[in-house]
Amino acid sequence: MPTYEFHCTACGKEFTTILSISARGEESIACPHCGSKRVEQQYTAVSVKTGKKTW
Ligand SMILES: [Zn+2]
């Protein structure tokens, strides 16, 4: 499962979302904290975490 990390520009919080490839459009992503859709995708090495699940 691909995991994507986002940063909300409205409330400043970060969150991780699992998305299918067909749902990758950023306009469909809403912040779970404040509900804003002003989110930016973080291009970090999230794929490393996904495989190990150490968190
Ligand atoms: Zn937010």
Image: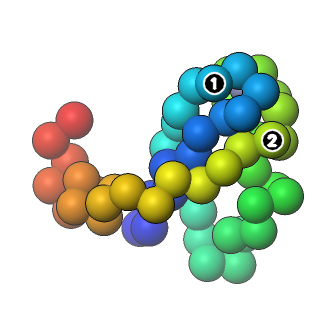
Residue 6 location (% of width, % of height): 57, 46
Q: Quadrant of residue 13?
A: top right
In this view of the protein, which residue sits in the foreground, 35 or 10? 10
Q: Quadrant of residue 37?
A: top right
Q: Which amino acid lies under the numbered mark 2 shown in the image of this protein?
A: Arg
Provide the secondary structure element on which disc 2 rests: loop
Real-space Cα distance between discs 2 and 1?
A: 10 Å
Residue 26 location (% of width, % of height): 76, 60
Is 6 situated above or below 10?
below
The CB of the residue at mark 1 lies under 8 Å from ligand 1: yes
Is 49 situated above or below 23?
above
Residue 46 location (% of width, % of height): 34, 57
Q: Which amino acid lies under the numbered mark 1 shown in the image of this protein?
A: Gly
The CB of the residue at mark 2 lies under 8 Å from ligand 1: yes
Residue 36 location (% of width, % of height): 83, 33
Q: Residues within 10 Å of mark 1 (few under 14, many from 20)?
A: few
Q: Residue farthest to the bottom?
A: 22
**Label ID, residue 38:** 2
Image-based side of 30 in relation to 8, left or right: right
In this view of the protein, which residue sits in the foreground, 38 or 33? 38
Q: Residue at x 22, y 35 (%)?
A: 55
Q: Which residue is mark 1?
A: 12
Q: Residue at x 53, y 33 (%)?
A: 14
Lower position in the chain sequence, tag 2 or tag 1: 1
